[in-house]
Image: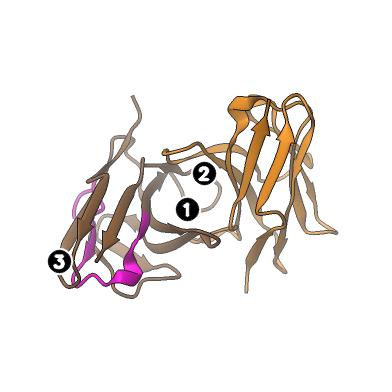
């Protein structure tokens, strides 16, 4: 069965520090990978997605993620975070069908 | 402006009292989906619809019904709500089911007493 594991439930970090949010997935077939962000009291919005091609994907707000097929990972990174990046981040996987599987989420707390 | 709207945004109800959460989109998307979000579990798909009159179960369909009579609307129906359906519910739409970006509504927080 397909699954998505976000390895950290909470990540506290100081403003202007780098951050990495980790995501691993299990699938024996090719997948499409997504990162969504949920700001407080809002719905989710897309940060970036990997469909094919270059394994380094750049998204909005300075975020990027790298697809690693051998390690079945899709970690999200940002070189310097801002207070406004405080949110919950969800990794998601689709195998080309009608179902997208979401991870449990990682809460990013950016401290001044 | 592209929008996904959900109503109501907040609802407190009692066990067994039928309720409907509405979802409407103005993007002419064919694919729509309902999720529930619970702490530590992320989002789990309840039902999805590929087009008008075409729906199918997601991963947690028990206790829920949906209908898709018009392209823009995809209501979620709880015929007899129970406390374990207390959750945050999101409607999402996309042009396609697998590679397209999903656009989420603002959420409906449901409490069943």
Query: How dense is the environment of label 1, judged by Cα within 10 Å: few (below 14), some, or many (20 and up)?
Result: many
User: Which chain is represented by brown in the image?
Assistant: B
Image-based side of B75 in relation to A36, left or right: left
Query: How dense is the environment of label 3, judged by Cα within 10 Å: few (below 14), some, or many (20 and up)?
Result: few
Q: Is residue B86 at all visible to an observer of this figure?
A: yes
For disc 2, the marked residue is: B100
Q: Colour of chain A?
A: orange
* Residue under disc 2 on the same chain as residue under disc 1: yes
The image shows residue A29, relative to residue B62, as above or below, that is above
Q: Chain of mark 3?
A: B
Mark 2–mark 1 CB contact (< 8 Å): yes
As for residue B29 lying within the magenta part, the answer is no
Q: Chain of mark 2?
A: B
Give the secondary structure at mark 2.
loop
For disc 3, the marked residue is: B18
Which of the two discs, 1 and 3, labels the residue nearer the N terminus?
3
Question: Which residue lies most toward the left here?
Answer: B17
- State which region is magenta: B69-88
The quarter of the picture where the C terminus of chain A appears is top right
Image-based side of B80 in relation to A101, left or right: left
As drawn, the label of residue B97 is 1
Q: Residue at x 67, y 31 (%)?
A: A111
The quarter of the picture where the N terminus of chain A appears is bottom right
Give the secondary structure at mark 3.
loop
**Mark 1 to mark 3: distance in Å?**
29 Å
Which of the two discs, 3 and 2, labels the residue nearer the N terminus?
3
Q: Chain of mark 1?
A: B
Residue A11 image position (x, y, % from top left): 70, 45
């Amino acid at each position: 069965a397909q699954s998505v594991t976000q390895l950290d439930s909470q990540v506290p970090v100081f403003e202007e520090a780098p951050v990495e949010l980790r995501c691993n997935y299990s699938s024996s077939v090719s997948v499409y990978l997504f990162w969504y962000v949920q700001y407080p009291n809002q719905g989710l919005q897309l940060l970036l997605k990997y469909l094919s091609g270059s394994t380094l994907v750049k998204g909005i707000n300075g975020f990027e993620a790298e697809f690693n097929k051998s390690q079945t990972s899709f970690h999200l990174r940002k070189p310097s975070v801002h207070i406004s990046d405080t949110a919950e981040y969800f990794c998601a996987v689709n195998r080309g069908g009608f179902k997208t599987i979401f991870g449990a989420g990682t809460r990013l707390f950016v401290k001044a | 402006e592209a929008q996904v709207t959900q109503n109501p945004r907040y609802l407190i109800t009692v066990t067994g009292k039928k309720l409907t959460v509405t979802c409407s989109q103005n993007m002419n998307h064919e694919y729509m989906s309902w999720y529930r979000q619970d702490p530590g579990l992320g989002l789990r798909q309840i039902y999805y619809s590929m087009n008008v009159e075409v729906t199918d179960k997601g991963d947690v369909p028990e206790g829920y019904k949906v209908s898709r009579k018009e392209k823009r609307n995809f209501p979620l129906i709880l015929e007899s709500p129970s406390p374990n359906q207390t959750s945050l519910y999101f409607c999402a739409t996309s042009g396609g089911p697998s590679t397209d970006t999903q656009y989420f509504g603002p959420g409906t927080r449901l409490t069943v007493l």
